[in-house]
Amino acid sequence: MANSLSEVIKKLEQQRIGIERALAALRDIEGPGLETAAPVAARSVGRPRKAKRKGGMTPEGRKRLSDALKARWAAKKAGASAPAKKAKRKGGMTAEGRKRLSEALKKRWAAKRAASAAAPAKKAAGK
């Protein structure tokens, strides 16, 4: 009996805490001038929340970012006035390598054509 009674008390206290939090939230919504008489314990349960900032960036932060980007582009443009070197091509194939590949492919396709021409002759001979 004592065990079930303590469980009931525990559940009621949890509900009381939830109700106090809900009341604190409702009081926050009402505004500063419309508070009703509430116990001090109920006010201490609901923690004040910080107001969420919408838009992500303050005007001061946006100005700092803008100034930094302008300085970066000015420095980049100042450095771009010198003649730019053409980037050296990496990899690729030499003319000699391209010629060897072309010859190898020609041999391969010639062998393939010869094999496909011989295949119908074998079929005709087999009949």
Image: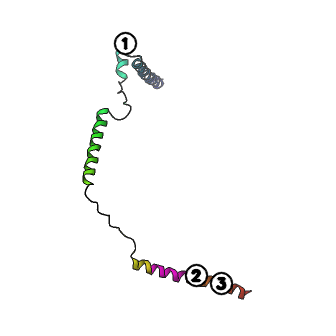
Q: Can you say whether 97 is above or below 15 in the image? A: below
Please tell me which residue is depicted at 27% across the width and 40% down the height of the picture.
67
Q: Position of residue 9 (x, y in %)?
A: 44, 22
Q: Residue 7 has which mark?
A: none
Confirm whether the magenta stretch covers residue 104.
Answer: yes
Query: Element under label 1?
Result: helix
Please tell me which residue is depicted at 39% across the width and 16% down the height of the picture.
31
Q: Can you say whether 113 is above or below 20 in the image? A: below
Q: Quadrant of residue 51?
A: top left
In this picture, which residue range is highlighted in magenta?
100-109
Q: Can you say whether 53 is above or below 20 in the image? A: below
Q: Can you say whether 46 is above or below 76 in the image? A: above
Q: Position of residue 1 (x, y in %)?
A: 48, 23
Confirm whether the magenta stretch covers residue 117.
Answer: no
Give amino acid for label 2: Lys
Count of number-bearing discs: 3
> CA–CA distance between discs 3 and 1?
99 Å
Which comes before the other along the chain, label 2 or label 1? Answer: 1
Please tell me which residue is depicted at 48% across the width and 82% down the height of the picture.
103
Give amino acid for label 1: Gly
In the rendered view, does 113 fall on the left or right side of 72?
A: right
Q: Residue 33 has which mark?
A: 1
Query: Element under label 2?
Result: helix
Which comes before the other along the chain, label 2 or label 3? Answer: 2
Q: Position of residue 11 (x, y in %)?
A: 46, 24
In the rendered view, does 116 fall on the left or right side of 91?
A: right
> CA–CA distance between discs 2 and 3?
11 Å
Label 3 belongs to which residue?
119
Label 2 belongs to which residue?
112
In the rendered view, does 50 fall on the left or right side of 114?
A: left
Give amino acid for label 3: Ala
The reply to whether discs 2 and 1 touch (Cβ–Cβ < 8 Å) is: no
